[in-house]
Image (spheres, rainbow, N blue to C red):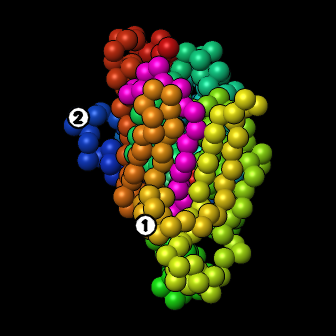
């Protein structure tokens, strides 16, 4: 199965390393890589880990036309305010009959239902497991393991940078020391204000609500209050009374629709939501048939994000094999 990568930063490179490790069992080949500043590389055969980039293709459309791929993998920088240009990249891939996998939550937070319908119209697969909790099962958990379940709501602690900032302040550092630490760990978004102002959490909340609760929302519509007003003094004061702070995403199905919010909440240090530290994340799904069921990811790194993308690729690969779809153009069409 041939892959065209749009974006080759931390996640793209980690994915290329993972694919190389698992090549004998999963014959996936990266035949195209397109970036913003580094240029474009395409080959009929698998590109090396450090491809020789030529000048950038004039457009994503031109890149996809030249990459001879079955699947487009969208791994460009998050824009939590608009989801663009990733939404257009995905549309360009669908219109060329390519399946799509993305780790970019922007399109899922802003345009999930439209993109899902577009994929269905073209009989293509559209997967995004890595967007919220890296490789930990969230969307696949519901799709594959919870048939018949209605998700009534969720509670999540989903942003790592804010936890690093809070924990740095608890250890007597400043807010900016915490941001620097998150940047050094490579976990802060390109613009770290997206993390601490709550945009990243709002985007994840919108993505979860759109996919699991058909909320048809976007991050701007979610009341969001980040941790920017938190000071070391306040954090120490809370610690003395056994409390701490986490940026918490909450969703609830109500008679009027889906109610969503993201807020820095004061929590008991001994409570479940406060028990995730550093880059660890936690999501609780509140359901009609399974009560509350949780997923915890302990200290995921970029390799686990790459694994989330890999899971989706394997899903598509198996679906293509299962349906024994003939060579182009039919092989790309999967219900
Ligand atoms: N890093 C993580 O742990 C993690 C976890 C979960 C989800 N994600 C999501 O995964 C995505 C990729 O993350 P990352 O850490 O790999 O980002 P990154 O290191 O900043 O890399 C982004 C890549 O996208 C390229 N790019 C940006 N705009 C582009 C455009 N308009 N057209 C073509 N290429 C473009 C960049 O090109 P240049 O190389 O030329 O600059 C770069 O190669 C993001 O959406 C992020 O939110 C990341």
Quadrant of residue 235 within the rendered picture? bottom right
Q: Position of residue 324 (x, y in %)?
A: 35, 11
Which residue is at 26% across, 42% downward?
22
**Quarter of the image with the N terminus in it:** top left
Q: CA gap, disc 2 to disc 1?
A: 43 Å
Displayed-image quarter of ligand 1: bottom right
- Residue identified by numbered label 2: 25
Residue located at (53% from left, 26% from top): 150
Q: Which residue is mark 1?
A: 270
Residue 310 versus residue 145 in the image, above or below: below
Residue sitting nearer the eye, 155 or 310: 155
The residue shown at (44%, 58%) is 272
Q: Residues within 10 Å of mark 1 (few under 14, many from 20)?
A: few
Q: Which residues are magenta?
A: 144-162
Give the vertical position of 53 relative to 99 (above or below). Answer: below
Residue placed at 53% from the left, 72% from the top?
A: 244
Q: Position of residue 180 (x, y in %)?
A: 55, 79
| Magenta stretch contains residue 160 | yes
Q: Is residue 134 left or right of residue 124?
A: left
């Amino acid at each position: 199965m041939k892959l065209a990568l749009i974006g080759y930063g931390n996640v793209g490179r980690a994915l290329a390393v993972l694919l190389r490790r698992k090549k004998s069992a999963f014959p996936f080949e990266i035949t195209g890589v397109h970036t913003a500043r580094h240029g474009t590389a395409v080959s009929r055969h698998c590109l090396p880990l450090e491809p020789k980039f030529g000048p950038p293709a004039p457009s994503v459309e031109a890149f996809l036309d030249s990459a001879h791929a079955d699947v487009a993998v969208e791994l460009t920088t998050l824009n939590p305010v608009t989801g663009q240009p990733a939404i257009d990249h995905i549309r360009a891939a669908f219109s060329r009959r390519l399946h799509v996998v993305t780790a970019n939550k922007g399109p899922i937070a802003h345009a999930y239902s439209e993109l899902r319908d577009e994929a269905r119209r073209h009989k293509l697969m559209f997967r995004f497991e890595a967007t919220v909790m890296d490789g930990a099962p969230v969307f696949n958990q519901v799709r594959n393991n919870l048939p018949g379940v209605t998700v009534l709501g969720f509670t999540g602690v989903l942003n790592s940078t804010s936890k690093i900032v809070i924990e740095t302040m608890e250890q007597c550092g400043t807010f900016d020391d915490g941001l620097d630490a998150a940047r050094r760990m490579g976990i802060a978004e390109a613009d770290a204000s997206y993390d601490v102002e709550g945009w990243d959490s709002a985007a994840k909340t919108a993505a979860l609500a759109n996919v699991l609760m058909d909320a048809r929302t976007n991050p701007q519509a979610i009341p969001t209050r980040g941790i920017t007003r938190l000071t070391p003094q306040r954090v120490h004061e809370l610690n003395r009374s056994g409390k701490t702070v986490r940026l918490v995403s909450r969703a609830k199905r109500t008679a009027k629709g889906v109610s969503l919010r993201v807020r820095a909440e004061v929590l008991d240090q001994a409570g479940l939501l406060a028990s995730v530290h550093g880059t660890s994340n936690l999501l609780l799904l509140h359901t009609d048939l399974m009560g509350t069921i949780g997923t915890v990811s302990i200290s995921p790194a970029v390799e686990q994000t790459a694994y989330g993308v890999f899971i989706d690729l394997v899903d598509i690969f198996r679906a293509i094999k299962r349906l024994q779809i003939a060579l182009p153009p039919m092989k790309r069409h999967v219900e």
